Image: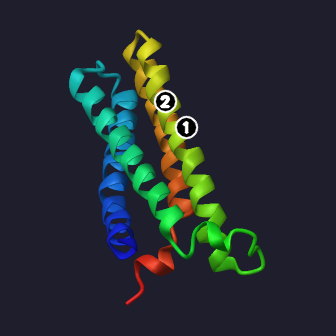
Amino acid sequence: MYHFLQKLHSGWAYLALLLLLIAVINAIIGLTSKKEFTAKDRKISLFALIGTHTQLLIGLILYFVSPLGKDSLGQMSNAALRLTSLEHPLINLIAIVLITIGWSKHKKLINSEAKFKTFAIFYGLGLILILSRIPWNLWFAK
């Protein structure tokens, strides 16, 4: 089960990152071109939200069944173990909280510019945090 979850978490990450990147680019384009916020824009942001929350759920399950997860917590002198047991889960949790805040805040806003700006800031910060804690050496290992 561990290996299946590990592959699912890695594979789903590509989809979640793509959806999040599309949502950020869409928000920046909407903000700079001063277009109206439409149902299509809302759906793009919603799919990014769902993709990242699904990734979080898979990651949390993986964390508790993984030999690299909670059992490695406290191994701060080993950079690889620190990344997989503490930094990756914590920073990505913060990123998803930011993305969720962005989604919640947009619902209270009326004008399109404010909605696009909210998504660009919160989803953009979430994307940057996620990209900063991806274990790239594991993604591209043979």
**Three-letter code for the amino acid on which mark 1 is drawn:** Leu
User: Residue 46 — which label?
Assistant: none
| Apparent side of residue 29 relative to residue 87 in the rendered image (left or right) | left
Task: Name which quarter of the figure residue 111 lies in.
Answer: top left
Residue 70, image x, y percentages:
62, 66
**Three-letter code for the amino acid on which mark 2 is drawn:** Gly
Residue 78, image x, y percentages:
72, 81
User: Which element carries disc 1, helix, strand or loop?
Assistant: helix
Q: Which residue is mark 1?
A: 98
Is residue 122 depicted above or below 57 in this figure? above
Q: Nearer the viewer, residue 94 or 56?
A: 56
Q: CA distance from mark 2 to mark 1?
A: 6 Å
Residue 71, image x, y percentages:
64, 72
Q: Which residue is mark 2?
A: 102
Name the residue located 33 percent from the left edge and 71 percent from the top edge: 7
| Apparent side of residue 1 relative to residue 64 in the rendered image (left or right) | left
Name the residue located 37 percent from the left edge and 34 percent from the top edge: 27
